[in-house]
Amino acid sequence: MKKITRIFVLLLLVLAAALAVGAQDKDFTHIEAILKRLDEQSRFDRTDFSALLTMIVENPESGIEKMVVRQFRRDDGERFLLLIQEPITEKGQGYLLEGDNLWFYDPSSRQFAHTSLKETFQGSDARNADFGSTSYSDSYEVEGYMEGVLGSFDVYIIDLKAVDDTVPFPYAKIWVTKDSELVLKAEEYSLTYRLMRTSLFPKYTKVGDVFIPVQLIFLDELVEGQKTQISVSEISVSDIPDHVFTKAYIERVNR
Amino acid sequence: MRIILTIAWRNIREHKVKTTIIGVIMVIGIMVLVVGNSFMDSAAAGIERYYIKNYTGHLMITGQSRGNLTLFGYQDVTAIEQAVPRIPDYAEIVEFANSLPYVEYINPQVSGAAMISRGETMLGATQLFGVIPGQYQAMFPDNVELLEGEFWQPGEQGVLLNKTVAELLERRVGFTFRPGDKLLFTSASTLTGMRIREVQITGIFQFKQSNVQLDMVSLMDISNVRALAGMVVGHTTAVDLNEDERAFLGTIDEDDIFASFDSLFAPVEVEEGNVGDDYWFSLLGDTTGRDESNVEDLGAWQYLLVRLTDERYLRQAEADFARFFADQGIAAQTRTWLQGAGAMAELSYGIKSIFNGVVFVIAIVAIIIIMNTLVISVTERMAEIGTMRAIGAQKRFVRRMVVWETLLLSGVAGTIGVLCGALVLFILNRVGLKASNVFFEIIYGGPVLRPVLSLSSVIMSFVVILIVGVVASTYPTAIVMRTSPLKAMESSR
């Protein structure tokens, strides 16, 4: 009888331990805190931000295209303006984000049309959403995580699921460095969990309190050999006049 | 032979129940085959006729490319990898086409797709065919029914909105679009980026014979479609990359990229100080070069549709064009009307193949049923056959007798089946089969199908039923042959 009691107690202990481990696994509080910090340290809330983006688009069919884009960003109010400077055929085309509205401007017809943050940017592998502030903590919920290594970096590999349809892809997996809490890599998946795009962020810089990637690589996982790299230069956090974030400005700068 | 036929015919008449059962199965089988095949042949012929007559011509000339290129653009995954090529040396090709005596008409086209908006509201989307009205109407005089307005005049711009597209847009805005209204068309290709054009509606139309894919096609002036498709003169400046920009070209090794802690942070100079208005309003500098690069490429076409004086010149035309392209070193190719017609036409043909598969299964089932009935029938006649064998009938004689019985039955039942099938088809032709939904519209190749009896289906049905008869009679004949005459005669006791 004593033996049976002992086995029963032992089983209960094992069960309790397993439940405790399970409960610990489901506790994503510290991962959610990391996501919050990722968002905070990537937002320009106190200053404006502008930079020159050089985009190299590699297409297995059409070869290499280069685009130069001037980016103006004001995260307080969720605004940005992307003004294309090269190639010459697209010079002056612009993307203006005003809160939830993203407008595309075509100087050849002098018309604006609504577009979406989820759309690709000018046939590249970047999405329009890639040019604004990130919002991992608002747009995704944590589905799981594990610890791992990427190159020389110890990382958290975090599985995310979009909470709404404001982000380009419903599922994502991000590799975040444990020490500096920077996203080194992201994989984005379709609803059927097919890998659609891999993003790599091999270089960062710190501007004030904000960390921004200055080298971004987007790999199209549907078309082999198709990728886009973006280099960020001529960074400034000086004030940008309010009128820059208006349709009138884009029209005027194109005259 | 005459004796065998006489005995076979007598047996058919003697065993009325067996004859009726097998005969009815055969009549129904052949009637299904005749009606089904005639039905599919009518649909296929209709699709071919109306596509060639109204949309594709007999041949479609395009630039050389891989992938499933149709009149609607690429209809496979290559659509995200490549733009529809422009036809190289277009003027030479047109000159050559016009020199061929069997070429009746040619019509150049450009295809595109655009989202349609008005003000700040996105209303829907449409497929666009960029055409020259005069040439388009000369080649396809009967396909457009103008419900309101007219084609744009030569030298003018405009869009002829498909009725289905117009109705979709009207549901969003709550009012009816009229000629004179303007709409914004935005193209968004992964290869050519975004372009916007404001275009005035000159008319509302519908294709006289259409389907769900063609219902989404609007006709637009060529200049605007070229602009939306990014078919501009462009620039010839070679891409000049510095060392940093070349660093990540080609294959990427993630471990290599993230190999060092030190390389993760890049010291970047942050520019200080505010700048004046001059800076903000001169950001783009001189835009003259842009305007020159965006001039419409007037010689750019994606498709040259060719209609022949007679379909029998098709092979010759394909060969002549192929030789011309090879001799002149032009990277162009011809495609058939079916390749040009796109998914809907291919789907109709695909469904026909599935139907043929179903017919095959029905034939197998018929063989089994007839074989089973024949086994019973032959077993019942075992004593009779045994007696025949005992009085000197050879195995070959008995085998031929059973086979001829089946063949005679097949012939009579087949003829009745064909007549019944023809009657059914006559009635269906008079009544006309209306497509109740999109699925049937695809199968019918249009909104109404009027099937006609096709000779190929009659021949095929007879061949099938004769094969069924012969195959079905082999097993019972084999049973009879395996049984000794003595045993066969004993079975009657």
Image (cartoon, rainbow, N blue to C red):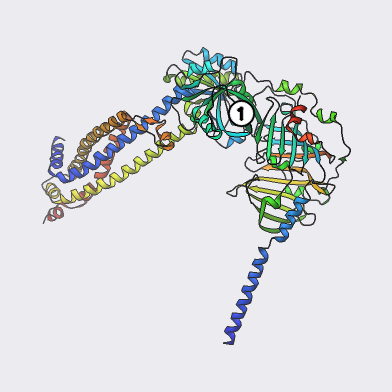
Q: Position of residue A146 (x, y in %)?
A: 69, 59
Q: Quadrant of residue B412?
A: top left
B465 to the left or right of A217 = left
Pinpoint the chain carrying mark 1.
B
Q: Can you identify the residue that label 1 sits on?
A: B185
Q: Position of residue B58 (x, y in %)?
A: 47, 22
State how many labels appear. 1
Q: Position of residue A117 (x, y in %)?
A: 67, 40
Q: Nearer the viewer, residue B444 or A167?
A: A167
Callout 1 secondary element: strand
Bin the neighbour count of mark 1 within 10 Å (Cα to Cα): few under 14, some 14-19, many 20 and up.
Answer: many
Q: Does residue B453 appear in this view?
A: no
Which residue reaches farthest right? B273
* Residue B192 sits above or below residue A155 on the image: above
* Residue A112 sits above or below residue A22 on the image: above
Q: Does residue A135 appear in this view?
A: yes
B32 to the left or right of B284 = left
Q: Quadrant of residue A245?
A: top right
Q: Quadrant of residue B353?
A: top left
Which residue reaches farthest front? B175
B160 to the left or right of B194 = left
Q: Looking at the figure, which quarter contains the N terminus of chain B?
A: top left
The residue shown at (81%, 36%) is: A241
Q: Looking at the figure, which quarter contains the C terminus of chain B?
A: bottom left
Q: Position of residue B86 (x, y in %)?
A: 61, 24
Give the residue type that dot 1 points to: Phe
